[in-house]
Image (cartoon, rainbow, N blue to C red):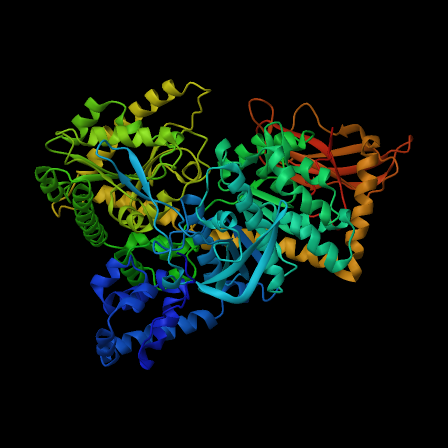
Amino acid sequence: MNSKIHKFTVLPKLPENLKPLLEIAYNLWWSWNPEAVDLFRLTDQNLWDKVKHNPVKMLGTVGIDKLKELSKDEAFISHMINVYNKFLMYKEYSTWYSKNLGNELANIAYFSMEFGLHDSLPIYSGGLGVLSGCHIKSASDIGIPLIGVGLLYSYGNFNQYLSNDGWQMEKYKENDFTNLPVKLVNGLVVDIPIGDETVFARVWKIEVGRIPIYFLDTNFDKNSLENRKITNYLYVGDRESRIKQEILLGIGGMRVLEALKLCPVICHMNEGHSAFLAIEKYRIVMDKFGLNFKEAFELVRNSNIFTTHTPVPAGNEIFDESLIDKYLKPYIEKINVPYDFVKKSGLVEQGFNMTVFALKNSIFANGVSKLHGKISRKMWQFLWNKLPESDVPITHVTNGVHIYSWLSDEFTIIFNRYLVPKWQEEPSDKSLWQRIDNIPDAEIWRSHLRLKERLIGFVRQRLEKQLLSRKRPNSEIRTASEVLEPDTLTIGFARRFAEYKRAFLIFKDIERLTSILNDKNRPVQIIIAGKAHQSDRVGKEIIKNIISTVRKPELRRKIVFIEDYDLNVAKYLVQGVDVWLNTPRRPLEASGTSGMKAAINGVLNLSILDGWWDEAFNGENGWAIGSGEEYEENHDVQDAIESMMLYDIIENEIVPLFYSTGLDNVPHKWVKRMKNSVKTITPFFNTNRMVQEYTSKFYTPVSKNLKKLTNNNFKVLKNLVAWKDRVISSWENVHIKSVVTTKKSEIYVGDDIEIKAHIVMSDFTEQDIAVVLYYGKLDSEERIIEGKTELMTPVGKDDSGCMIFSAVITNENSGSFGFNVRLLPKHEGVLNEFIEGLIRIG
């Protein structure tokens, strides 16, 4: 017999003088402030660990007697007041943004399918979520007016455990929102059209320093049982549930912003999962400003930014056309938007591609490393088939990490002592990091050894729990306290177990690996962690094979696999190992960030030259496997060659360097490489620099252009739409008739070359068309590399009526150089001249 459940919520109740604890707990600022972490740890050390470092749950669980005791503890109260004052000052003090940009930017909404903010908030899966979390934290630190938008999952990501034969199993634990640092936005429920249904979403808010993140959740009684499940799990496998999630994130997210009166807004799409937001933005600007669809499309595209994170096909979401028809067509037609146009904007041969739709609806797009930008231009060139690959309008902003979230306490103390505290305010100042060389080698080494000992203690405890949970024999459980040694060279490997990340590479030759690990004089040990996607059988097979290898008697104490990898495990690993191993199949890793987290803690990278490492490695700050080779399809050959390289580097370079110590037992040459790593990697590969780059490259130009487009009742926007129709329809009539140069047979450094281009302008004037000289050094295939541009100047007409444009090149270096002349459409409202794909080259 069913009965009505009368619900009520029990909240933490604290003595009056402890109330600041609750305010701090509900803002994730505490998670990257060591003194705040210590404050909660001091509240109840055992309980702190038991609740997975969740202060909200701890304050609601700790006994009343304990709270009364703390309320009378003068030392604790003093510490709390100090932390609280720092928290209040953090929210009020001037920032990089306020000092440099004032109030120049419009609101920026950052949409992401997942946010990796802290291990107590399991609403993330992997690198994309962790990057989102670091982006938000740095935006808070430097004061960018950002607003996060995401989904709040009832179960989120899974907990991993292994069966006795090493097969990955998944266990889902329901998130108790009442014991998480999330607050319901009272009275705010948005309705989202999904197919023929209306789905309702309530809205939750998380404070991350100065930045709010709004999360949508459908699991409440206003929805049908089926629709309540939409936000149950992150990255659900079946396609109908997935498209519902992405409509909820995109269209629902925009409705939340509209309800909060935050529109119009610049939208930054972190991956293509939120791309349907463009559809709702069409509706909002048409309703709000009375624009027609062409004008709305132009305004929307000029206010969207898109970041793509992967060249792997599985990371670029594709839906069958029938799902687009079923779940989007009814709403799109209802709001008087041309459905065929929307559908065509995302259609490719395989179906409706969310990345393609995002690219078509964004004014700027970027990859997440220099190499990934290049790969992305090649991958998506077909969308702009008239443009040379180098001109495809996809640039790059290399990822970083939020230093204060990943830096160990030990290294924070050292940096404060030798770099002066300014490094915390301006971590991208390269000159500050040069002071690393002033730190005594022994001091860095002792700090590193303490972190390593802490890691090994953590691993032993974790391994014992794993073995107990699998009911392994007592003889095997006892070995948990004997695995790993603090004075042994330790290699760490932790990431998602996708096939292209090649966790198996170091296990290709077990006999050679065993010999390396068990060398009596110079042993090596390995710590491994990571999850496979729940539906990835190949990834699970890789884990199973590794577990089978780990259990060999001769390797049992030398290799440890840590189950249930999360942000807490990641911190121990990136702070405590000696070498961070990364073996992706180039060029499939867009960026990667785990190696950056390791580097800021003095851990040295050993990696394939892919993603971020391709631009970070300088020969003195770690090791590279190979020289950036790419193998066409022959993966077996690639794996065999690169595994041999890996063993050679470990045996011949890493091991000798690590064990080469002085009379003081400090490996001075190793420490020198540690210092090189910190001072070359930290000032660039951090999210403060990354967010500042997003601001200068995208946020600021887009914000300024939007003001221009919307001024005077959208005069520039409407003019732009009419101009665009005229240019596209008549572009075929524009030609480069001839290019004339004063080039001689021999040119010397310092000589000038004048170039004149004769242009058939048709019905256009120089106000409509930019004539651009593109020049630079030539590679072996006679392609211009690192080209420069110069706007050519109109100087008159020739006898046939063609306009003549002129420019001068000064040759500053010797070598083989070349140039061409380009015609591009030009308008005061055009922010990205390549976005329409219109170009003439001669």
Give the quadrant of residue 88: bottom left
Query: Image point 36% across, 75% down: which residue?
Result: 20
In the image, is 145 to the left or to the right of 332? left
Give the quadrant of residue 207: bottom left
Total numbered badges shown on the rendered structure: 0
Is residue 692 shown above or below 580? below
Nearest the viewer among 46 and 10 is: 10
Nearest the viewer among 806 and 331 is: 331
Q: Is residue 499 visible?
A: yes
Query: Which quadrant is the N terminus positioned in?
Result: bottom left
Nearest the viewer among 54 and 647 is: 54
Percent coordinates x, y for residue 674 in the rendering: 29, 45
Nearest the viewer among 97 and 561 is: 561
In the image, is 641 to the left or to the right of 665? right
Give the quadrant of residue 612: top left
Is residue 377 shown above or below 831? above
Query: Which quadrant is the C terminus positioned in?
Result: top right
Percent coordinates x, y for residue 561 in the rendering: 24, 38
Percent coordinates x, y for residue 617 in the rendering: 39, 38
Q: Is residue 390 visible?
A: no
